[in-house]
Amino acid sequence: MNQAAIFHRSSGSLCYAADKDTAVIRLQTGKEVEQATIICADPFINELTRRKEWYGQRLPMQRLVELPNHILWEYRTQPPFKRLQYYFEVQADGETYCVFDNRICPVQERRKASCQYFKLAWINPADVIAPPDWVSDTVWYQIMPDRFCRDKNAPDDPKFIPWGRKKYFGFNHTYGGNLKGITERLPYLASLGITGLYLTPIFLAGSYHKYNTFDYRTVDPDFGTEEDLRELVRQAHQRGIRIMLDGVFNHCGTAFFAWQDVCRQGRNSPYYDWFFINQEDFLSERFDSADGRYYTFSFWSGMPKLNTNHPEVIRYFSEICGYWVREWDIDGIRFDVGDEVSHTFLKALRRHLKPLKQDLFLLGEIWFDSQNWLDGTEYDAVMNYPLSSCINDFSRCPTMTAMDFMLALNRCLTMYPEQVTAVLFNFLDTHDTVRIAEQCGGNLHLLYQKLTLLLTLPGTPCLYYGTEIALCGKDADDNRPCMPWTAIEQGQHTAVYQDVQKLIRLRHDYPALKTTVITCLLDNTYPRLLHYRRFDHKQHSPAIGVVLNGESTAVPFTVTGTLLYADRFDGHTLLPYGTIIYESNE
């Protein structure tokens, strides 16, 4: 037995409370393990029964999912006194091993040395991870305000480039998109099925993208006024659309008042410790910060890094975010460079903001395993880059089978407690990546396959603006074009828009697509035929089946239920890049 493959810890996604009553215990093993058993009971059961030693009840664990190199087993229970002590037994090839917190040993040797049990000390309701309920029902849409829409009554301003003109997207090249323009397009977004808007930064800054913030309380005049923002939020809420703002707290722009004071007074500035300054002569004309004179975002000298450990920095930004919530009634904050902001900052900010609006959504931009930020005291969720890689790899790697995809997907779906998985921020592209339509090379059928995955897998999906019309773009200088409103209004993109609209409508209409329950169905004859079904947690609604043909040839397929959506399917044969969504009658 491969003991090195066996792992458990009484925390994170391996031991957590799904709600105030339910404990979830998971064990990772090698693939050779045939059965896993949990031995569990209240940690004080022996005192109640006056036995000398603690003892537990033997209960079989469910084989939850297969991972690329492991099996994950699960046991769910509702301990009557909210406590649980336990250890495991695993069986393979006629051998049985005990798994304790401090050792793994053959079952016959369990009494030869001291054994430390695992323990879920107490299910405290205040500690149960509970993201806002509304998030799992949301279909997001990311907007860069400068490139989305300039309102129809906006006066001509020579500082703005004519809308849609192709030109190098430099730091200060702006097109004049604004908040009023977004408000004007709310009917378009509502018709598409969007129920949440994520706006990249809107505050006073020295660039078109506004990630080098100068003033966190002032809406950038390029985008409008505070009243314009209030009106956008008000009208969005009337249409059932939530608003999430982008908060840049890892770093600021060089015109931020505190940095300016430090530049004037040096060590005599009361804000000197708001930053990480390493040299006396930190002021320089040098564009990068690779000399280490002070820390920055990446090596951009124009974005000095904030010391988010400092109590005054924490207090300042807590008040700023509180202002956003109180004055504008926003529904969420996305934290840029969310892995570099201190845990101390995030815990304090959450404690400050949640009493102001209990269902405020706090989202971290983190590109990797984020368990350290997702214990319920910091972020509610993170951007799901692992899932994006999983989806993109299936089309990018022709040797990747449906089984390979399933194994990679299972890892994505079990990285965190299930209530976190349900609200992970899923996406195919952002302002930081190549646009998904570009990745598809003009193949709309492949685009529909990827959007189907995005909209039918667990988590809360987000479309980058223009994806609904297959807008293309390669990198940061090319993936942020102006929305082609004239062409849209002339009907040039209607067909794509309507297909995406259908997919989003299915997401809204079928509760099974908003859960974390999924079953993959494999066909050895067609190894790249991806087929899975989504279920309601309580089986109250029909299962929804999803089929994608990743083969290079057509595949025969019969729908056992009601066809809800089809692309490149004639009722009997699914062509390459074809997609089926159906309501199962099985």
Image (cartoon, rainbow, N blue to C red):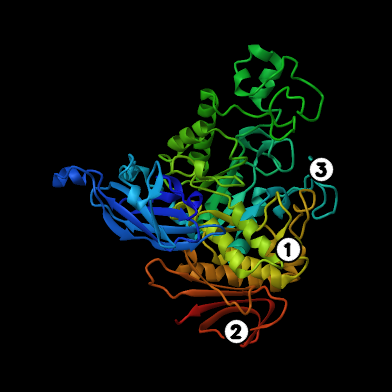
Residue 315 on image: x %, y %: 50, 27
Q: Vertically, is 541 above or below 245?
A: below
- In 3D space, how far apart are the residues under numbered discs 1 and 2 (Cα atoms)? 27 Å
User: Who is closer to the viewer here, 239 or 32?
Assistant: 32
Q: Residues within 10 Å of mark 1 (few under 14, many from 20)?
A: many
Q: Name the residue at the right extreme.
A: 167
Residue 205 on image: x %, y %: 70, 36
Q: Residue at coordinates 72% horizontally, 71% vertically from top-left?
A: 444
Amino acid on which disc 2 is placed: Phe
Amino acid on which disc 1 is placed: Ala
Q: Write down the quadrant of residue 62 in the picture.
A: bottom left
Q: Residue at coordinates 67% horizontally, 57% vertically from top-left?
A: 465
Q: Residues within 10 Å of mark 3 (few under 14, many from 20)?
A: few
Residue 17 on image: x %, y %: 36, 50
The mark lying in front, picked from 1 and 2, is 2
Query: Which residue is label 2 attached to?
Result: 557
Query: Which residue is label 1 attached to?
Result: 437
Q: What SS does tag 3 mark?
A: loop
| N-terminal-most mark, 1 or 2 | 1
Give left or right: position of 300 versus 312.
Answer: right
Q: What SS does tag 2 mark?
A: loop
User: Who is closer to the viewer here, 540 or 122?
Assistant: 122
Residue 306 on image: x %, y %: 62, 28
Q: What SS does tag 1 mark?
A: helix
Q: Residue at coordinates 44% horizontally, 62% vertically from top-left?
A: 93
| N-terminal-most mark, 3 or 1 | 3
Query: Which residue is label 3 attached to?
Result: 170
